[in-house]
Image (cartoon, rainbow, N blue to C red):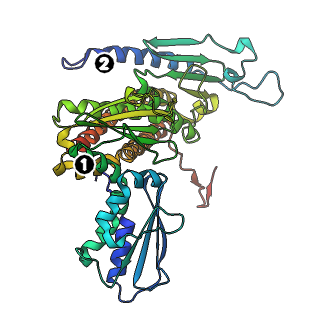
Amino acid sequence: MLLLETSNRILENLVNDRLNAEKFETVEVMAADFDGVQFHISTPSEGKNLLQISIQTRCGAELLKFGGADKLKAIYGPLLQASPEAGYDATLLVDLSAPPAGQTKETLAKHIAAFKRHLIAAPFLYVFEAMEKKAALPDIIAIHYRDQEAFYIKPEGDRVIVIFDVNFKDADDIVFSKVFLQEFADARRTISNAPAVTFSQKEPPLELRGVKDVKASESHGFISFVLFPNHTAAKSREKVVDLIQTFRDYLHYHIKCSKAQMHTSMRLRVESLLQILNRAKPEPVDSAKRTISGKTFKRA
Amino acid sequence: MAAPSAPAGAGKQRAYLSCIRATITAAMCLENFGSQLVERHNKPEVETKQSKELLLNPLIVSRNKEKVLVEASINSLRISVAIKKSDDIEVVLAKRFMRFLTQRAENFVILRRKPVEGYDISFLVTNAHTERMYKHKLVDFIIQFMEDIDKEISDIRLTVNARARVVAQEYLKEFA
């Protein structure tokens, strides 16, 4: 379970439950996902057999502009609502009694659960497909998916460079991230087809020169992935997009895991040290004494 | 006699630790001594440092970057340790580990909650401790403590590096 899942378990379980339930009930659920994404699942007033799922992301406008709107329409077809629920970026409306064309009851849950994945994958696929068709592309696409962080997609010849701007709230995290990222950069030696990874702390890479709003400070690290044509080709691009959209969360997740592992081993070490210290204390003398006539008394 | 397969550093490490052990054993001759300045008070003289005649000369035993400062007085003994840290990640690990330990200072009786300036961790042993516990076992504990910290930090560092390698491999092999 090292890699992170891209689909949302909450959505999947909810849709599965509703599909397998005997009668339709009203649903009102707010769920969250990585990167501050929020879902709102509710039963609209039009009918109890309908289920409305809305998604809200910080960069919704940017995502929809760069291929998001087209991608969602292509994947979800009639499920996608023309105008989203108020305060949300996109809305799906599902009829639980009649799964849409091309989906069975079993696959519908997974189809809905991939809602966020498809939305965030959109700009990547937009760039990959445009490069294949040799269509015109903007110089660099910036998506500000988190409060202090963004990722940038820059097509360059036949490659695509994806740059992550990652913010580290804790200064110790920066040291851990250097260890992890060094391994990422070195992995090319053993895995021949891997994308080239470079990273720098505080200084944005050359590709980001001239881009506005790039936050460069001590706590910001920049990680660049160079994706080669074999990564952006049609047969591997879906998997590549899955992996690359969760990269920042993957990194932070594993940094936190190694901190937790550290704490566990420190606790074990503290236990063993305490045992050694306790050996220094002499055993308490048993202080219950008896007199000749048989009376027992305890001395402190 | 070191076994032929033992690394060369092990002998030096042993010499360093046995020197520290000798120093601490010699310094741990503590007796009860009430405060000369305030009636009815009994303070560890090495902490207050008010009366010069009650303090012994402080001694530093050092080996490259790591050093141990031993300050003794008539009723108390303060031992401060500076851990060897070879790179950034060890600095971070040492800091975290020391914070972890000092938060549990109550359990460790002889540990001081704040290290002395310039050192990573400090112990304060008073005559009350030596009256309640065996002196030679206390010295054993301190030496064992120092060995364990070094071992623990290098262990954690190895696991972090191993984890980083596995994480990177898992992720990037999916691309291939």
Front-lying residue, B72 or B122: B122
The percent coordinates of residue A276 (x first, y second) are 44, 37
Residue at 32%, 82% (x, y): give it.
Answer: A20
Label 2, label 1: how far apart the Cα atoms are: 61 Å
The percent coordinates of residue A229 (x first, y second) are 19, 39
Left or right, residue B102 beside residue A34: right
Q: Is residue B99 above or below residue A32?
A: above
Front-lying residue, B153 or A18: A18
Front-lying residue, A36 or B38: A36
Extreme residue in the front direction:
A136
The percent coordinates of residue B144 (x first, y second) are 42, 29
Residue at 22%, 74% (x, y): give it.
Answer: A102
Extreme residue in the right direction:
B39
Where does label 2 land, which residue? B10
Q: Are marks 2 and 1 on the same chain?
A: no
Which element carries disc 2, helix, strand or loop?
helix
